[in-house]
Amino acid sequence: MKGIESDEFIKEYINFLKTESVYKIFIMEKNEQIIAAMFVTMIRKVPKPNKKESYIAYLTNVYTLKEYRNQGVGTKMLSYIKNYLKQNRCENIIVWPSDKAIDWYARNGFKSENEILECEL
């Protein structure tokens, strides 16, 4: 990734990790090296009559080191996260995938159910 090693970016990223407690960061390690990471935040849904508290999960910054791709690492991690979210009353997961990742998400149960409207600010 271009610019990922700049000191300014690294400081900003570390500060983000220390201060943004709304994200749960899931990692996979091999030989004490992080080989994959996924960030998840849970958004509480507005309460409805006769319905238990529930959430929507937003999955972002899904990344696996190149040398570990196509080995099931991301799929295994995503499966773990999906189970975690189910246990924590999440009804669904939303993502904004890159074009390259759409097929991977589709293989893992994601589908385009609704057209999300977006307003750029």
Image (cartoon, rainbow, N blue to C red):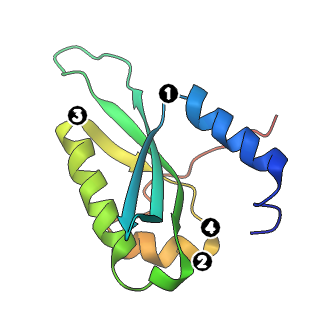
Instruction: Tell whether label 1 touches label 2 (CB within 8 Å).
Output: no
Instruction: Tell whether label 4 touches label 1 (CB within 8 Å).
Output: no
In the rendered image of this protein, does residue 45 appear above or below residue 36?
above
Nearer to us of marks 2 and 1 is 1
Q: Which of marks 3 and 2 is nearer the N terminus?
A: 3
Q: Is residue 33 left or right of residue 120?
A: left
Instruction: Tell whether label 4 touches label 3 (CB within 8 Å).
Output: no
Q: Element at badge 2?
A: helix
Q: Residue 21 carries which label?
A: 1
Residue that numbered label 4 is attached to: 98
Instruction: Tell whether label 2 touches label 3 (CB within 8 Å).
Output: no
At a point 58% along the width and 37% down the height, the residue shown is: 17
In the rendered picture of this protein, how many numbered marks are placed on residues?
4
Q: Which amino acid does label 1 sit on?
A: Ser
Image location (x, y in percent) of residue 24: 42, 39
Cα gap from disc 1 to disc 3, whole angstroms = 19 Å
